[in-house]
């Protein structure tokens, strides 16, 4: 065998080896992105489950409060309307963009605000607060609000890990090639950085 052929064979083998390494790296990166994307989708499901739990509790809560004959109907109507709006806005897990999450979060925020107003008004009705059913539902709602906060935080953590991974060099080539897009985050409500004022 001639020396030139041997060098060509070694060079060709080296090129094939480098291409194989690159392909294996690309497959590994792609599979990791798929796993991370699935983690974000799974965590989004946990967030939705807690919001759904709150949606399911609200009708019983409203009906318990409605039992007080002189209760302010306008406050109940706001809660019912806000719940209706919040249930009408859904987010496709394959498109967890900033815009989609902002719209979802706004509707959920309006519902939280309506529930907060309802709780303030209920303070004026000791006969409602005295019922066991009301107290049980209030505890359930408060617990659900805490679970929502925990699941949203976990979602943001998983989304941040995924977003950082797909943006880093050289993974950004694979993410761009296969359409892995950045996920949106939950953000604090406007004015949340300001401490509430307590007035007596």
Image (cartoon, rainbow, N blue to C red):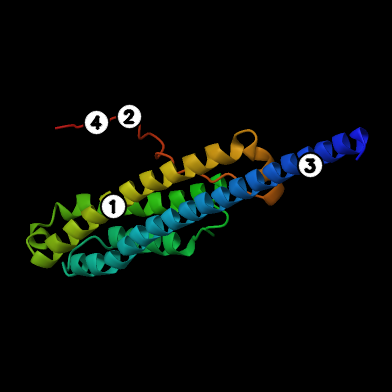
- Callout 3: few (<14), some (14-19), or many (20+) C-alpha neighbours within 10 Å? few
Q: Position of residue 108 (x, y in %)?
A: 40, 53
The residue at the point 32 percent across, 47 percent down is 149
Q: Nearer the viewer, mark 3 or mark 4?
A: 3
Q: Is 62 on the left or on the right of 92, as rendered?
A: left
The answer to whether any part of residue 173 appears in the image is yes
Above or below: residue 112 compared with residue 167: below
Displayed quadrant of residue 74: bottom left
Real-space CA distance between mark 4 and mark 2, rounded to the nearest whole angstrom: 9 Å
Judging by the rendered image, the residue that carries numbered circle 3 is 13
Which is in the foreground here, disc 4 or disc 2? Answer: 2
The circle drawn on residue 197 is 4
Which residue is disc 1 drawn over? 147
Q: Secondary structure at mark 4?
A: loop
Of marks 3 and 2, which one's residue comes earlier in the chain? 3
Residue annotated with mark 2? 194
Query: Tag 2, which secondary structure?
Result: loop
Q: Residue at x 17, y 57 (%)?
A: 139
* Distance from the alpha carbon under mark 3 to that under mark 2: 65 Å
């Amino acid at each position: 065998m001639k020396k030139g052929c041997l060098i060509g064979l070694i060079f060709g083998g080296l090129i094939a080896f480098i291409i194989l390494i690159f392909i294996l790296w690309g497959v590994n990166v792609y599979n990791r992105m798929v796993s991370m994307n699935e983690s974000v989708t799974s965590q989004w499901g946990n967030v939705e489950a807690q919001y759904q739990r709150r949606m399911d509790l609200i009708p019983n809560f409203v009906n318990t409060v409605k039992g007080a004959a002189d209760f302010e109907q306008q406050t109940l109507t706001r809660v019912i309307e806000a719940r209706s709006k919040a249930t009408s806005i859904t987010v496709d897990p394959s498109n967890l963009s900033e815009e989609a999450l902002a719209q979802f979060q706004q509707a959920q925020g309006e519902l939280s605000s309506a529930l907060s107003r309802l709780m303030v008004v209920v303070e004026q009705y000791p006969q409602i607060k005295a019922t066991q059913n009301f107290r049980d539902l209030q505890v359930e709602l408060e617990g659900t609000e805490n679970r929502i906060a925990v699941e949203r935080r976990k979602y943001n953590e998983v989304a941040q890990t995924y977003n950082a991974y797909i943006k880093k060099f050289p993974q950004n080539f694979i993410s761009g090639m296969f359409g892995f897009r950045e996920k949106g985050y939950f953000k604090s409500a406007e004015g949340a950085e300001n401490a509430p004022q307590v007035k007596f």
